Amino acid sequence: MTNVIEKLRHYRKNHSPAMIATEVMFYVLLLLCALTVLIPSLWAVATSFKFETEVLDANVTLFPKEVTLENYISIMGNRNVPILRWFWNSFKIAVVYVVLYLAVSSLAAFAFSRLKFKGREAMFWLGMSSMMIPGVINMIPNYIIIDKLGLVDNMFSMILPGLGGVFGVFMLRQFMRGLPMAYDEAAKMDGANEFQIYFHIVLPMCAPVLVTLAIFSFQGNWNDYVWPLIVTNSAETRTLTAGLATFSGSYAHQYGKQMAGAVLSALPILIIFLLGQKYFIKGISIGGIKG
Amino acid sequence: MEKAIKAKGEGKRGFSVVVPYLFVAPFMILFIVFGLVPLVMSVIISFTKWDYATPMEWYGLNNFKLLFGLIGSGQVASDFWNGVLHTLLFVVVETPILIAVPMLVALLVTRCKAVRKFSMGFFYFPTILSITTVCILWNFLLDTNSGIINHYLGVEIPWITQMPYAWISIFLLSSWWGIGGNMILYVAGIANVPQEILEAATLDGAGPVTKFFSITLPCIRRTVFYTLVMTTIGSFNMLGQAQVLTAGGPNYGTTTAMMVIYNTAFGGVNNFGRACAMALVFGAIMLVFTVLSFKLQVADDAED
C-alpha cells in the first residue's frame, strides 16, 4: 500500500495537473464502460437470490431484502431443464471437437505445406474455394447425412460436420509455410519419418496458432445454437446453448428462477475462462491474424 | 540378396508415395462428406418437393418460382423476403456498431495501461456467454414491469413486444454480447503498432485523431478487415436473438431469413425442397457480400 502511494507521489511530481486530469478522465470513461457490463450481470446474480414476490415488487432494489436459495433448488430439481447435464454435454462436445479439429487440420496443413504429392494444389484450392460458401446451404443436407448415419441425438452429430471446416487448415498452412524446411531435412537425415517430423518438430512450433485456433473453435462450437437444436430430439442430449432456448418459456415471468438458470449456465464457462485467461489473451495476441 | 534389398526399397518408396495422402485423408473425407456432398445435395433437393417422410417428387423450378412470387399466392415469397430484409437490416445496423464501438473501447483500454490486461478479460466476459444465456438475462432487464431498464429510466416501454423497441432491444443485446470479441482483437493489433512511428508523429505535432487515422488504423487494417468479414457473416446468420428474445415478433417484425429457413425445414413439417431453395437464394446474397469484401482486401493488398 505504501508502495502504491509512493508511486503515485512520484507520478505527481513528473506530470502536470493537466496531464493528470486527462489521465483520470480516461480511467473514468473506462469505468463507465465497465459498468455497462457489470450492472446487468450484478442484477442477474442479485435477482437469482430473491423470492419471486420481491422480484415483482414495484419497489425494486438491487440487493435482496431477504436472501433465498429457493430458485437454485427449484431449478436443480427440475428434470426438464437439466442445466448441469447440458453444461457437461457442451463441455464434452466442445473439448472433443477442438482436439479432433486441431489434429485433422494440422495433419492436412502439414501435408499441404511441407510434403510433395500429386494433386496437392488442386485439393487445397478445392477446399479453400468452399470457404466462402455460406454454411446455411449445407444445413439441411447435413441433417439428412447425420440422420442416415444414425447419429441424431449422438454427441458426434455436433462434432463431425464442423471438422470438415477449412479455416483451420488455411491458417495452419500459412503458418507452417513460414517455418524453415531445414528442420525437416535435418530430422530426416537422423532417420525420422514424416509423422515424427510432424508430431515432434512442426507441431510444437505451431503452438501459438494452435492455441488461437483452439479458442476460436471452442467458442464456435460452444455457442452453436441452431445445429444442436436440429440434431437433438431429447433434452438429455442437448447442449447448454440449445437446451436453454426454451428455458424462459418454462419459467415465464419467474425472473428469480430465470436468473438462477442464467447464473448456473454462465458460472462454469466463467471459471474456465478465468483459469485460462492468460493463455487466451496471449494466444490471440501472438497468433493474431497474419494469415 | 541385392534383388531383395531393391524390392524392399521399392516397397518403401511405394509406401512413402501414399504417406502424404494419409495426412490429408481425414480432412478430405470429412470435407467431402460434410462440405461438398451437402452442397450438391442442396442443389438437387431444391428442385424437388420433399417432406423427408414420403418419396421425393421432381418439382422443377417451382420452389424458386414460389420464392420470387411467380406462382402461388405470394405468401411464401413475402414471408421469405420479409426475413431477408430483416436480416439485411440487422447486418447494416449491427456490423458498423460491432466495428466502431469495440475500436473505441480498445483505444480506451490501450490508453489505460495500468488495467489493460484486466480490462481485456473484463470486456470479453459477455462474449463467452452463450446467446441463450444472454437472451434470458436481457429478457429480464427489458421486462416492461419488473425490468431494471424501465425502472432506471422511469418509463414503461414494452421493449420486446412493440416496434421499433423490439429491434432496439435486439441491437442492444447483440452489441452487449459482441463488443468484447472484436475489442480484444483490436487491442492485440494496436499493441503491434510500432511505438517509434507514433512518437515521431507526436513530435511532428500530430493530434490523437490524426495519429489514429494515419498510423494506427492503417497498421491494423488486416485485423479490421478480418473482423469486418467475420462480423458480417455472423450478422447474416443471426437467429438466436430473434428466436429466444422476441420469438420473431411482434407480428413477424423481427423474423430473420435464418428463422424462415429453419421453420420451413424443421418447424413441424419438413419442407426440405423449399427450404433448400431458400438457403441457396439467401446463400447467394451472402456470397455477394463476402466476395465483395474479399475483393476489397485483394485490392488493398495490391497497393502494398
Image: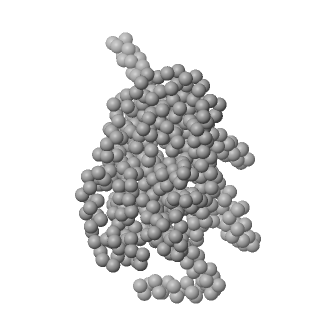
* Left or right of A42 in this view: B286: right
The image quadrant that residue B196 belongs to is: bottom right
As drawn, A49 above or below B88: below
> Does residue A91 appear anywhere in the picture?
no
- At 39% from the left edge and 15% from the top edge, which residue is drawn? B6
- At 57% from the left edge and 75% from the top edge, which residue is drawn? A29
Looking at the picture, how far across and down is residue B260, in whole percent?
52, 42
Q: Residue furthest front?
A: B73
* Left or right of B216 in this view: A31: left
Between B145 and A277, the one lying in front of the other is B145
Between A195 and A11, the one lying in front of the other is A11
- At 50% from the left edge and 34% from the top edge, which residue is drawn? A138
The image quadrant that residue A248 belongs to is: bottom left
Looking at the picture, how far across and down is residue A139, in whole percent?
48, 36
- At 34% from the left edge and 40% from the top edge, which residue is drawn? A233
> Does residue B196 appear anywhere in the picture?
yes
> What coloring was used for the rendering?
one colour
As drawn, A117 above or below B192: above
Assign the N terminus of chain A to one quadrant of the image.
bottom left
* Left or right of B9 in this view: B85: right
